Amino acid sequence: MLELFERHTPEDGMDADYCKEVAEDIVEGNPQIAQDYANAFLDEVNWYEIADAINEEESEVFTTKNERD
């Protein structure tokens, strides 16, 4: 919020729709900021949890298939 809206004050009378519009305009005008936010998001991902979930799902599929054979 601070990075995108640091220049706005309560006097600007911003509602949710206008906030979204401002953010979209910033991202559209500066693709680097979108990449920075995406990278920050990816840094917070628990990749081990995702891998475990995928492997667990694959294991369940394999077990079910073997039970049918």
Image (cartoon, helix red, strand yellow):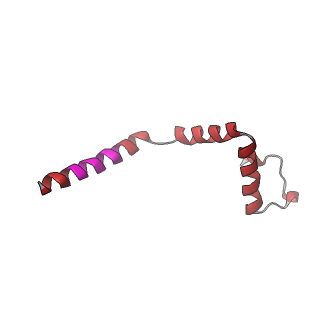
In the displayed structure, would residue 1 be above or below residue 32? below
Q: Residue at x 45, y 42 (%)?
A: 46
x and y percentages locating residue 19 in the rendered image: 75, 56
Give the quadrant of the C terminus: bottom left
Question: Left or right of 66: which side holds 17?
Answer: right
Where is residue 47, by image quadrant?
top left
Q: What is the x, y in percent for residue 58?
A: 28, 48
User: Magenta segment, which residues?
Assistant: 52-62
Assess whether residue 55 is covered by the magenta stretch: yes
Measuring 71% from the left and 49% from the top, which residue is drawn there? Answer: 1
Q: In the image, what residue occupies the spot 68% across and 36% down?
A: 32
The x, y position of residue 14, in whole percent, is: 80, 60
Q: Is residue 66 left or right of residue 58?
A: left
The image shows residue 40, relative to residue 61, as above or below, that is above
Is 45 part of what is drawn in magenta?
Answer: no
Viewer-side residue, 7 vs 24: 24
- Report the predominant secondary structure element of the magenta stretch: helix
